[in-house]
Image (spheres, coloured by chain):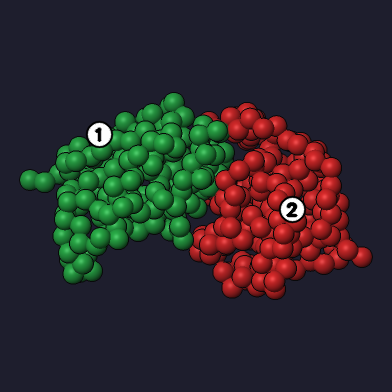
Amino acid sequence: MQPDWPAEVHKEFATAGVRVVGYVPDAGHKRLIELCQADKKMRAVPLTTEEEGIGLAAGAWLGGEKSVLLMQSSGVGNIINVLGMVSVCRFPLVMVITMRGQQGEFNPWQVPMGEGTPRTLETMGVAVRQAGEPQAVAAHVRLALTRAFEASAAEAVLIAQKVIGIKSFQEQRSQ
Amino acid sequence: MTLRRREVVKDLLKGRKGLLVVAGLGSTAWDITAAGDHDLSFPMWGAMGQAAMIGLGLALAQPRRRVLVITGDGEMLMGIGSLATIGVQQPKNLTVAVIDNERYGETGMQATHTAGGVDLAAIAKACGFKTSKLITKNTDLGKVVHEAIGPNFLQIKVAADKLPLVLPPKDGVHLKDRFRKALADVLPKKP
């Protein structure tokens, strides 16, 4: 049986005491977003651009609360400059990022940012953890949460496109 | 008479006590420092466009405290989508005050979009802010900052003055840690 990674990741968030969940939707995050929205202890905050999620996370931490940011790899391009604030202030940051532009991608416009995602994050001082299998996702998220909130680290867990398994535009639309 | 930014910001911060304050990079960070640096102030030196979102994060984390974001028109324009995000969240304790000189003050006083007629207060109103006001003359704004049910938005037109720099601490870790410590100190201890 396939592990239910969205449920496992939601459980990790709950155990870590995450209270604010910023997100820009992705088909691959659909279920995790719904689990966070349904959790009365969490505030799910839809964003107009991923960049807003960095400010949201910084503000929540200044106010004493833990947060996470959910997005797809295209969004990494939208947060580069503001990652400078995360680095210089040593704000804890946990991003769970679904990958585009990998195995099974049907849209060539997604490929350049997808390929550049790990290097872009590392260049800006974010530790990158690649979850290539469904059963690996929760363990990476747990480590990222611990490192971020106990050691003021900036962490990204990249969920491989094959984990999400979207193969076509039609499939994505009918999710 | 045209409003002066330093006087406006001093008035906004009058009797601040437990007020949590975020200032956008550039002139507004210098303005809040000129009014008196404070541990519960987070003056930004970068991350342009994020002041209002930091305010939202704070407001959600500290629903019993009042949060005031003071930022410039250029900084607000760069994060204009955050007004929509705040409108959806409806934080009752958040006020965003834009000190609008219609200029990019740190880069040579180039005109911003507000000089070209863009109406920030109307945008905030359309995004669902409970109060959204254009302020052009001396007005007591204390009630909005400390009492009005938010989210509140103030677009305050000021003269395009070039003023002496009054710089806050630069070290980001220090600014973050002092804020969190001050907040923990003023909060009642959890049982």
Mark whose residue sits in front, 2 or 1: 2
Label 2: chain?
Answer: B
Please, which chain is the residue tagged with disc 1 on? A
Where residue A112 appears, as percent x and y from the top left, is: 31, 52
Q: Which residue in the rendered view is the most extreme toward the right? A: B1
* Marker disc for residue A157: none
**Amino acid at dot 2:** Gly
Disc 1 residue type (three-letter): Ala
Residue to which mark 2 is pinned? B108
**Where does residue A55 sit, x and y in percent of width and height?**
53, 47
In screen coordinates, is B91 left or right of A142?
right
Distance from disc 2 to disc 1, alpha carbons, whole Å, reads 50 Å
Tell me residue B85's x, y (percent): 51, 61
Badge 2 vs badge 1, beta-carbon distance below 8 Å = no
Residue nearer the viewer, A91 or B11: A91
Q: Colour of chain B?
A: red
Residue where numbered disc 1 is placed:
A139
> Along the horizontal axis of the image, is B85 left or right of B67?
left
